[in-house]
């Protein structure tokens, strides 16, 4: 089951999932992307 998706314009060079659940991705153009899931219930 997919709950979300992180789409970037360049290939991802590195990926980290932090202890608090946030996701960080670095692409080949040197940009940092992040994804944070928030439970709004």
Image (tube, rainbow, N blue to C red):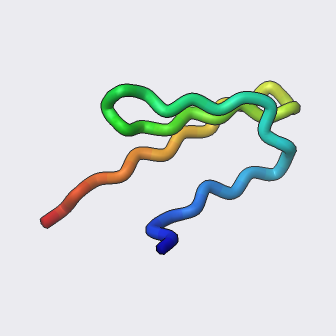
Q: Nearer the viewer, residue 11 or 33?
A: 11
Instruction: Choose top left, top right, bottom left or bottom right for residue 25.
Output: top right
x and y percent of residue 3 in the render?
A: 45, 68
- The residue positioned 85% from the left and 43% from the top of the image is 11
Position of 20 with respect to 11 (left or right) is left
Position of 40 with respect to 21 (left or right) is left
Q: Nearer the viewer, residue 21 or 34?
A: 21
Q: Nearer the viewer, residue 16 or 35?
A: 16
- The residue positioned 86% from the left and 31% from the top of the image is 29
x and y percent of residue 14 in the render?
A: 72, 29
Report the residue that reaches farthest toward the bottom.
1
Report the residue that reaches farthest toward the front.
1
The C terminus is located in which quarter? bottom left
- The residue positioned 69% from the left and 57% from the top of the image is 7
Q: Nearer the viewer, residue 18 or 29?
A: 18
- The residue positioned 50% from the left and 64% from the top of the image is 4
x and y percent of residue 2 in the render?
A: 51, 70
x and y percent of residue 24 in the render?
A: 56, 33
Instruction: Choose top left, top right, bottom left or bottom right for residue 5.
Output: bottom right
């Amino acid at each position: 089951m997919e709950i979300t998706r992180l789409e970037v314009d360049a290939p991802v060079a590195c990926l980290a999932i932090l202890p608090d659940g946030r996701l960080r991705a670095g692409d080949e153009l040197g940009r940092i992307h992040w994804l944070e899931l928030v439970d709004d219930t």
